[in-house]
Image: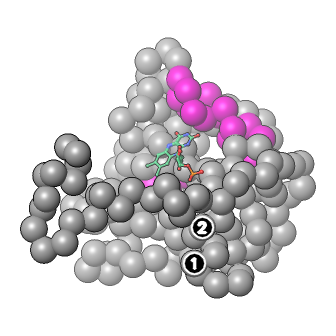
Amino acid sequence: MTDFQTLIINRRSTRKFTEEPLTPEQVEKIMKAALMSPTSKSSNPWQFLLVEDKETLEKLSLCKKIGSKLIAGCALAVVVLADPFVSDVWIEDSSITSIMMQLQAEDLGLGSCWVQIRERHTMADTPSDEYIRELLDIPMQFQVLSVIAFGHKAQERPPFDEEKLQWEKIHIGKFNINQITG
Ligand SMILES: Cc1cc2nc3c(=O)[nH]c(=O)nc-3n(C[C@H](O)[C@H](O)[C@H](O)COP(=O)(O)O)c2cc1C
């Protein structure tokens, strides 16, 4: 890593991956980042299900109508699960751990993409979480928040254009409606 600011300027979602698998060390670092994520009351409501098998990745890539095909070509998909009975803020906890893994992957020079599962549906209109639960034998007590796809980047994406940042969304002291209505 050069520095954190450079990392976040250059981080973009990767949807095209090479065939190269991840090393066990890379997977370990990504999962360490997940396990070190902050959670409310340190309740750690999440579980992580790792999928590297090509056939299962293909099936997993059908979990949504749109936006999940990329899973078929990734080297590793991490299905982020959480138990809502362990934490009432499992969505926040699971979202934080998802982005922590993505930032760690970026730091390793790897690409990643978040695939949203909660509140999404398959082509046949089955809830995406149900489809994944059945495919991967996930017990009913766990909610499926996201699938994070990882792999070696097979596409170059431009970094953020700092000139285009939406500074009007930053309000100082009191909310200023004029900033957003022009
Ligand atoms: C909550 C969330 C859900 C997302 N779901 C998907 C998805 O289902 N499929 C996908 O291809 N990208 C998904 N993304 C990636 C966004 O499309 C992407 O972050 C956004 O377009 C900004 O692009 P960037 O990540 O390259 O900066 C998701 C990102 C977030 C934060």
Circle 1 residue: 5
Residue at the extreme left: 174
Q: Which residue is mark 2?
A: 9
Percent position of residue 51, x then y: 69, 51
The 10 Å Cα crowd at callout 2, few under 14, some 14 to 19, many 20 or more, is few
Amino acid on which the number 1 mark rests in the picture: Gln
Q: Pick whichever, 149 or 139, lies toward us.
A: 149
**Discs 2, 1 touching: Cβ within 8 Å:** yes
Distance from Cα at disc 2 to Cα at disc 1? 6 Å
Q: Which mark is residue 15?
A: none
- Residue 87, picture quadrant: bottom left
Q: Is residue 39 left or right of residue 50?
A: left
Q: Where the C terminus falls, by quadrant? A: top left
Question: Where in the figure is residue 111, as x and y percent of width and height?
Answer: 72, 58
Q: Which residues are magenta?
A: 61-83
Identity of the residue furthest to the top in this view: 124
Query: Does residue 90 appear in this view?
Result: no
Q: Residue at x 52, y 18 (%)?
A: 123
Measured as percent of width and height from the top left, residue 161 is found at 58, 58
Residue 99 lies left or right of residue 168; in this view the side is: right
